[in-house]
Amino acid sequence: MYRHYRGTVRAFVLSTLAGIAVTPALAAENASDGGLDEVIVTATKRNENVRDVAVPMAALTGADLADANANSLADYVTRIPGVVFNDYQPGVSEIVIRGIAATTYHEQGQTTVGYYLNDVALVEPGFPIGIPDIDTFDLERVEVLRGPQGTLFGSSTLGGLINYVAKTADPSKFDAAGEALLGSGKNQDGQVNYAVKGMANVPLIEDKLAFRATALQRFDAGYLDNTGTGVKGSNDFKTQGARGSLVFEPAEDTTITLMSTYQKTKLDDQTYLTLGTLERNTPRPEPQKTDFWLTSLRLDQNVGFANLTVLGSYDKKNNFTVFTYPYAYVTGNTTGAAAAYDITRANAEIKTAEVRLASKDNGPLRWLIGSSFLRADKYSADHIYQQGAAAFIDANPDEFGGYPGSVIAPNDSIYGYISSTYNKDIGVFGEASYRPIDQIELTVGGRYYDTKNSATITNAAGSLGPGTFSPTDATFGTTQSENGFTPKATLAWRPEKGTLVYATYSEGFRVGGPNPNAAILPGIPKSYDSDKVKNYEIGTKLSLLDNRLLLDLTGFHIDWKNIQARLFTAAPYYYSYVTNAGSAKIDGVEFSTTVRPNRYVSFTTNGTWQEARLSTFLPDTFAVGGGYTPGTTLPGSSRWAVANNLRFQLPDVAGLPSLELAHRYLSTAPVAFGDPPPATRGNFHEFDLRASIAIGQNYHLLAFVNNLFDRYGVLNAPFANQFTPQGSIIRPRTYGLRLDWHL
C-alpha cells in the first residue's frame, strides 16, 4: 500500500513540475498586456462570463482548439479536469465525467454524458447509434460542464455535458478562412495524414441576412498492421463534413437562425489490437461507418421583460459495423473466411423542440422557465454469419434436431435480432436566482420529466451450435414509463470581483430500456429501469493579479443508485445485457490553474484526484463469487489524471513565434467489473510539442509532434479476460505541418 501511494504521488509531482498538455483554458490569452480575456458561455442557457458561473466548467475557445492542433475529442477533452475518454471505436466512443460509468466499452443504455450542438441534443436515449465527434474547425468554443445537469438538460447528464458551439452566419461582414494539414507518423506504411477545411461567410443583405458555410475532409492514416488480412496500417480513418447556417435579423431584437450540419466517418478496420504490439489479427477487415445530418431552426426574440428562445431540430443518424467472432459456433471454424462475423445496421431519427423564457440580467431576481420535447425512433438489425453453416447443419441433422440449414441458418445467418424502439421525453424546467445583497446569490431550480419508451425485438431463428438452435423467430415487446423531478440548488458568494465560492446540490437521471438478448438466454431481464445520481459539491473560482492568475478548485461527492450495469453472460457466447444493481460512491477533487506572469510565458495545470467505488454488492450471475463486492473500483476510474501546458511566445518579434510543450498523465484503472490486472488501462505519460509563427497578416504556420516520446499508452481493454488481451492505445508518434489562412 505504501509503495503504491508513493508511486502515485511521485507521478503527480512529476506531471505537475513538468509544466506541460494543452489546457482546457478557462480564458484566452491577451498578448497586449499579459492578462487573460473573458470568455462568454451559453451552456447555462444564458450569456455569462465563465468566471462568474457557479458551475465547474471548462470553455475552450476556437483559438484554444487551433493552438492545440485539436481536431477531435481525443485531442482536447482528456485535458479537462474530471474527464476521461473511452476511446475505442471512432464515431461511438464515449466521454466519462467524474467516473460515472459501468463499462469502458459502450453503455448499452443511454450515455452518462449529454452531447449538444448549439443547445440541440446529438444523442438519443438508449444505446447510441452514433456519438458525433464534431470537428473543431469553425467552432466558437466547446463548453464542458461537470456534475449532473438534469435541471436544464434532462436525462443523459449524470456526469455532465458537452456543448459544441458552432459559429453561425454574421450579417455584418464578409469573412473566409481555410486550413490545410499534412503529416505522417509511426507505422503508417508510407501513408500521410491530411486535412483540408474551408469557411466562407457572405452577407446577403447588409446587417440583416447572411449565409455561412464550412466544408472539411480529414484523413488519419492507419497505424495498426492486420496480420490476418495482410494489410499494413489497416485502420485508416476518414472524416468528411459540411455545415451551413442562415441568419436573418429582421429587427434589432429578433434573430432567426437556420443551421444544418452533416458529418460522416469511415473506419477501414477496427482500432483494437493485441496489447504490447501494433498488430491485430482478424480474418477479414472490420469496417465501421457513421453519419448524421442535423438541421435546427431557432428564434431569439427580445420581448421586453425577458428573452424568448424557440428551438426545434431534426437529426438522422446511421451506423454500419462489422466484427469478427473467434468462436467455433456451428462449423467449428475460427480462422479465415469461414470464421463467424457480425454485421450491424442501425439508424435513428431524433426530433426535439424547446421553448424557454429568460429574464433580463438586471435586478436582484433572475429567472428562467421552459419546456422541452424529444422523440427518438430507432431501428437496429444485428446478424452473425458463418460461411457454410447451412450446409454443415444439413450434413449433421442429428446434432440440430433434424431442422434444415435453411431454417436455422438462412443464408448462413446463425443469429440475429431486429430491434425497433421508440422514446419520448417531455420536460418542464425552471430556475430562479435571488441576490438579497450583491455578494450572495441563491439559485434553486428543477425539472419535471415524463418519459416513455417501448421496444419490439425479434430474435431470429438460428443456431449458435449444437443444442443452441431455435427453429422459429421469438418476438417480445417492452413498454416503460416514468415521471419525476430533478432538483438543483446553488448558494454562491462573491465577496469581491474575481472571487467566487459556491456550494451545489444537484441530481441527474438516465432512462431505462430493453435487453435485446432476453429471448435467447434465460436469466436475462427483458428490460432495465432508470438510474439516478445525487451530487454534492463545493468550489471556488479566483481571478487574481489583474486576471494573470486563475485558480479553480472543486470538491465533490456523488451517490449513484440503481446502477445500469452492463454485464456479460458466461462463455462461450458472452451475451451482453443490462441490469439495475448495486450503488456507488464517488469522491473527488478537481483543480485548474492558469498563470501568465508576463507577455512571454503562460502555464496551465489541470488535474483530478478521484475515488469511485461500489458501495453495495453488485450481483452478477455469471461472475466468480456471484458479483462484485463493495469497494470495487468502477471501470475506467483512474485515481489521478493530470494535464499541463507550458507556452512561450514573443509578441514583439515579427511573426509572433511561439513554442508549446504539452503533457498529460493518467493513472491505472480497471477496464471492467471482474477483470483483474493486467486488464487495466492508463499508467502512461504523453507529451506533445508545437511551434507556430504568423506569416504576414493572413497566414499562420504550425509545426507539431504528438506523442513526442512515442509512449505506448493503453486506453481500453474491456474484454481482455475473454479473448487474447486486446485493447486500444494512444496513437503512436505523429508529426506534421498545418497552414491556416484567414481573410
Image (cartoon, rainbow, N blue to C red):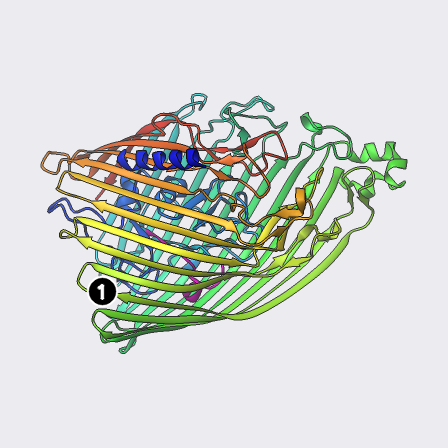
Relative to 335, say whether 146 is above or below: below
Residue 671 among those drawn in magenta:
no
Q: What residue type is labelled 1?
A: Arg
The residue located at (78%, 47%) in the rendering is: 461
Q: In which quarter of the image is residue 280?
A: top right
| Farthest residue, direction left | 652
Numbered range of the magenta stretch: 142-157
Q: Can residue 731 be seen in this view?
A: yes
The residue located at (24%, 49%) in the rendering is: 175
Residue underneath mark 1: 494
Q: Residue 503 in the image: state x and y as whole percent.
A: 33, 63
Secondary structure of residue under mark 1: loop
Q: Can residue 134 be seen in this view?
A: no
Which of the image's four quarters has the N terminus?
top left
Graded by Cα atoms within 10 Å as few (under 14), some (14 to 19) or many (20 or more), the crowding at tag 1 reads some
**Relative to the observer, which residue lies in front, 112 or 500?**
500
Q: Residue 333 in the image: state x and y as whole percent.
A: 74, 28
